[in-house]
Amino acid sequence: MASERKGRVAAINGNMVAITFDDYVIQNEVAYVACGADRLKAEVIRVRGDKAEAQVYESTTGVKVGDAVTFTDALLSVELGPGLLGQIFDGLQNPLPDLAKECGFFLKRGVYKDPLPDAGQWDFTPSAKAGQKVRAGDKLGTVPEKIFKHAIMAPFDLKGEWEVAEIVGAGRYTLKDVVARLKDANGKLVECRMVQTWPVKVAIKAYAEKFMPTEPLVTKMRLIDSLFPVARGGTYCVPGPFGAGKTVLQQLISRHADVDIVIIAACGERAGEVVETLKTFPELKDPKTGKPLSDRTVIICNTSSMPVAARESSVYTAVTIAEYYRQMGLNVMLLADSTSRWAQAMREMSGRLEEIPGEEAFPAYLESRIASFYERAGVVRLYDGTMGSVTIGGTVSPAGGNFEEPVTQATLKVVGAFHGLSRERSDARRYPAIDPLISWSKYPSIIDVREIAAGHAILRKSHDVGQMMKVIGEEGTSLKDYVDYLKGEFFDFVYLQQNAFDPVDEATSAERQKAVYGFIYKNVLQADFAFTDKEAALHFFHQLRQLFRGWNSAAQDTGEYKKIQDEIQALIETQLKSKKDGERA
Amino acid sequence: MHKVYTNIIQIAGDVITVEADGIGSMEIAQVMTKGGVSLAQVIRIDGRRVSLQVFAGSRGVSTGDQVRFLGHPMRVASGENLLGRIFNGSGEPLDRGPALSENMVDIGGPSVNPVKRIIPRRMIRTNIPMIDVFNSLVESQKLPIFSIAGEPYNALLARIAIQAQVDIIILGGMGLKHDDYLFFRDTLEEAGALSRAIFFIHTAADPTVECLLVPDLSLAVAEQSALAGKRVLVLLTDMTNFCDALKEVSITMEQVPSNRGYPGDLYSQLASRYEKAVDFDTAGSITILAATTMPGDDVTHPVPDNTGYITEGQFYLKNKVIEPFGSLSRLKQQVNGATRDDHRTIMDTMIQLFASYRETLEKQAMGFQMSNWDKKLLRYGGLFESQMMSLEVNISLERALDRGWEILAECFSPEETGIKKALIEKYWPVRKNME
């Protein structure tokens, strides 16, 4: 330790302590507050005169004025290396299973474990050769991690070109072993290990170029993929009042989205929901690989009763790990639930700092923080030409379910797709409760543009007629309008709504979506039905809906699927034929 | 050993500031006034200035009074001896029993490591169809009852407490009316449940801030019992009073308010209490049922709003029934697949039809002609309200499901319900089809 700088606690207000210091302090450096036998991690967030103010990542119960503080010189960082996949960390990258082994049921404060267990030896295969020129993020070699070839890369903070001075041969090494030495033009040497640390609040930028996200990312949710698509490397947000199904939606996407790796940041939400993910993922099979889902997942879990300051850092920890895997040319999805809790953590700290509050007491820098977080998404071309992407989906929990509030508004400005959940839809058990009338997406869909437009149009028309009917009644509505109303309701029921508890219906492949959407477009939306009266129309659509429900539960490659499709076709044809007969007569 | 200071330099609201050295954050002190001894808790330290919230209120505190620091955070006794006992918001006996000091535990302890939790899997049967069928209560769930003043939420809590199969019932009363307290006591006594109950009671007549400790005391005791393998049900009523006390203290401390005067950390404060609900890996469990009154029946008010984001669902108690819309048990899916194979279908179908019934009611109110379908819905809605929704109904889950089929068959043809064929064949009452 070059400098063991010390300080003393001068004041305590909740999880903020003021510290008098002897020498100098660095903004955002990590410090440890000694409280009895415990060492509590803290981050310097403001310096005023001879006092540094730090947020403590733990409960400050029992901290006294005069307690010793040690500064570390390091910004809040995470360790990046093999062994991250399948792990469960808290917001500071503390591995929770290891903590449980040591401390039992409760999270004991002041206990910090190594995020990456060093006991394991990793099978390193070099890919770079001595004398080769490398830049930050270039591959030096690989180790197998679960189903991936985990790339060991040149440190991300290298500037310019470096030469590989030496590199070890293939073999088993620990994370602490030096696997390569790099040399710059001046002969300066850096040692590379399989693990590197990176400050969480700084984006990793070791890539050649960042692209516009255009390629659809299939989530197997019909409403999303067809009407409000997400793009690989894009961003989307899911605001909704409580009870509208945000978390269930995120869980479904984490299972079915077509990506290599999923990072789940459970930020300030219920512990119970994380537990569900923790316990089910090791048992669920990844449809692509047949391996447990947990093998391609990293969970960052800072639930609502865990310390607030660590909640603020948890989303950064998550996005940094996402960027790390992107650097290997993988497609990563980060699901943050919920960004509002993260914003509230900022608000709590801002209040303790007695900063001048902005709207609803959120700090003035709320918008820029949200924007810079979502900006860490993207699809990039690495120096070696491979592509990698980070897609970010964040839920927002607006106070009172009102989308006018600051966090929702700041988020809407920066994301590429908006999946607004509505209480009306969830009350009516129309899941997923994404409201098709308010949601939008700037990304291209897997369905033809014209067909999509027709879908949107019928939903709007149906809604308008429905509203109108509330005023003028069914008898005041023309039969044509009434049929449009029924078409919209039908489309909603059998296509937009998806039963998350039906093994087939819960996930619809892109191919099936195209087929079914095309079918509905051609045979229902475009069809010119004629009914004798409204009762007959209602009856017809009830029957149609019934058949479609069964169709949605039938796997695509079964006889059942074909059989029901024929039944539906027959029912529609009978209806159209009766119309022709009527005309002839 | 205890440090005693007499230099009180500020008294504002229920917060006093005293000059002292070597005091730990959140430490407990006794303030000795002429009127008696009150507990106080350190809430901020700035150099030598230590601010404490005085639980009995600051009225009558003199600048010359003694403040005696106890050197530890707030503690409470725990264990079997508490059963059948009644305490106040500071943990002192309200009945005539002795004060307890065994197995003292710190209140507001650390949170449970998520990896040591398990997925809840046991349903708590209440024999109220609106709960059992439509929003099953699950062990380790945290669930508030949203209602307005005047609704029988305390009666509902008491009924669930008596009928639920749990080992220990803990009641945390905040700002409780004295007659409500007596109601709980008498109701539990009549049902023979008082001997497995523990009360922490803060009544409306007590100083406001004293209710701040009630949830922590109740939950700390619950936690100890759960660790000893007991299944504990904690009732907290009314959490809005708790939030109002938080508001009062934070305004006194000149904190920037976030929304309608409530502190910015309201969410975290509530979460750290509600998240004590747990099903331990190898021990017992804590289930929390809370009453949250909504000022002005406004669910977007900060208290119900923040609560709703924390809890695993909510029950709306409106016009003396549990309202099916908005009411939600997030954990019901964990248990209602294993009860009976028609449970989920009955639940979904009946609610969807009930939603249509509500729409029809609106149409009817506006004087529109009722179609055949509307008439069927009206008939259905009436039956649903009287035979399912009414809180008078006290039947088992299985009986309630059967009744669901009967109601459906009385009003609709099978295809009108949209239920899958297989289930129709199995459960649709045959009698109706033959008529």
Image (cartoon, grey):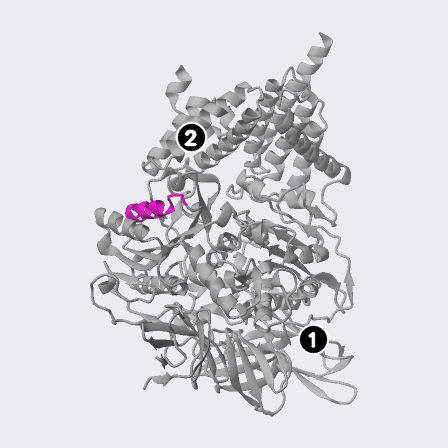
Q: Quadrant of the N terminus of chain B?
A: bottom left
Are the residues at dot 1 and dot 2 in contact (C-beta closer than 8 Å)? no
* Residue A461 found in image quarter: top right
Q: Is residue A397 above or below residue A194?
A: above
Q: Position of residue B52 (x, y in %)?
A: 43, 74
Q: Position of residue A403 (x, y in %)?
A: 64, 51
Amino acid identity at mark 1: Phe
* Residue A571 found in image quarter: top right
Which residue occupies the foreground of this view, B239 or B423? B239
* Residue A287 visible at all: no
Q: Position of residue A327 (x, y in %)?
A: 68, 67
Report the mark closest to the observer, 1 or 2.
Answer: 2
Chain letter for mark 2, please: B
Secondary structure at numbered mark 2: helix
Q: Which residues are magenta?
A: B150-165
User: What label does residue A156 carry, if any?
Assistant: 1
User: What label does residue B384 carry, if any?
Assistant: 2
Q: Is residue A153 above or below residue B296?
A: below
Q: Are marks 1 and 2 on the same chain?
A: no
Amino acid identity at mark 2: Phe
Residue occupying the point 60% across, 55% down:
A395
Q: Position of residue B308 (x, y in %)?
A: 50, 52
In the displayed structure image, the side of residue B85 where residue A399 appears, left or right: right
Which residue occupies the foreground of this view, A288 or B325? B325
